[in-house]
Each structure stands twice: as structure tokens, then as C-alpha cells.
Image: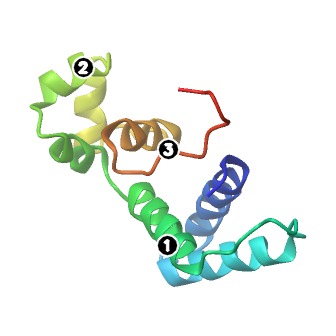
């Protein structure tokens, strides 16, 4: 999934989950596929339905992970996790116990860093 498609998907998710807390992965996937199908494709573009489903499912799972699940996935203690990712321990603690909400962009970034969320496509030559 390209960066601009992921950005669209995250905005869609945030808008729809606010409107309907029972918003499902299949509705999310259908809306993204519909959006992608409405765009004109270049002749060299190859549509990979399995790859697209995998990307959408992966993004859905990452968006629905709580900060405590992300810390648990890392296999680190909360203090080690906070130190490794330079997050104040009290902030991480507040995110994990639900006292303060963790911003979605932080959760996405942590999921990418831990390999939970597949890296976005990069331009040739970038690291």
C-alpha cells in the first residue's frame, strides 16, 4: 500500500470509528478497495488482491492495537520500552493504563518500528 493510500485509510478509519464504534474490518477493507478502484490505474500497474487484502488487514490490526499490546509485543519491560523509544515512562504508563490516549500516529510509528505494520513503499535508494 502506497503512503498516500495509507494516509487515506487512516483518515477513513478515524472518521468512521468515531461515527460507528462497531465499524468492522470488512467495511474498512471494502471502502478502501472502492476508493482504490475509483482511481485511474497506469498501464504498468498490476493489481494484487491478496497483497491488498494483506495490507488492509495488517493496517486494521495495527490501528486497533493498544499501547500496552504494542509494549507486550516488543517483549520488553515497560521501562525498557520507554528508554529504547525515548518516551517518558509516566507518559507510556498513562497510555497503557488508559489515563491518557496515545496519538494514532505514535501507535502507527511504533508498529512500523517493531515490524507489526509492514513498512510503507519507499522510493528507490532510500533507507
Q: Residue 3, how many percent across, how many down?
A: 66, 47
Cα distance in 3D space between marks 2 and 3 = 19 Å
Mark sitting earlier along the chain (3/1): 1
Q: What residue lies at 14% left-to-right and 22% top-to-bottom?
A: 80
Q: Nearer the viewer, mark 2 or mark 1?
A: 2
Is there a contact, CB below 8 Å, between mark 3 and mark 1? Answer: no
Q: Which residue is tagged 2?
A: 84
Q: Residues within 10 Å of mark 3 (few under 14, many from 20)?
A: some
Q: What residue lies at 26% left-to-right and 45% top-to-bottom?
A: 70
Q: Which residue is tagged 1?
A: 21
Q: Residue 104, how many percent across, how many down?
A: 50, 44
Q: Residues within 10 Å of mark 1 (few under 14, many from 20)?
A: few
Label 1 element class? loop
Does residue 106 lie above or below 38 as drawn? above
Which disc, if any, is residue 104?
Answer: 3
Cα distance in 3D space between marks 3 and 1 = 16 Å
Image quadrant in which you'd find residue 86: top left
Q: Residues within 10 Å of mark 2 (few under 14, many from 20)?
A: few
Amino acid at each position: 500500500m502506497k503512503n498516500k493510500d495509507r494516509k487515506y485509510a487512516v483518515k477513513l478509519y478515524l472518521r468512521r470509528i468515531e461515527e460507528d464504534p462497531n465499524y468492522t474490518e470488512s467495511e474498512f477493507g471494502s471502502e478502501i478497495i472502492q476508493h482504490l478502484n475509483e482511481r485511474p490505474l497506469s498501464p504498468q500497474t498490476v493489481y494484487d488482491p491478496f497483497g491488498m487484502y494483506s495490507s488492509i488487514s495488517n493496517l486494521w490490526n495495527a490501528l486497533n492495537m493498544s499501547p500496552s499490546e504494542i509494549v507486550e509485543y516488543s517483549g520488553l519491560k515497560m521501562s525498557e520500552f520507554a528508554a529504547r523509544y525515548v518516551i517518558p515512562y509516566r507518559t507510556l504508563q498513562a497510555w497503557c493504563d488508559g489515563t491518557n490516549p496515545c496519538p494514532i500516529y505514535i501507535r502507527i510509528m511504533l508498529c512500523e518500528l517493531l515490524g507489526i505494520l509492514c513498512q510503507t513503499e519507499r522510493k528507490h535508494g532510500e533507507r
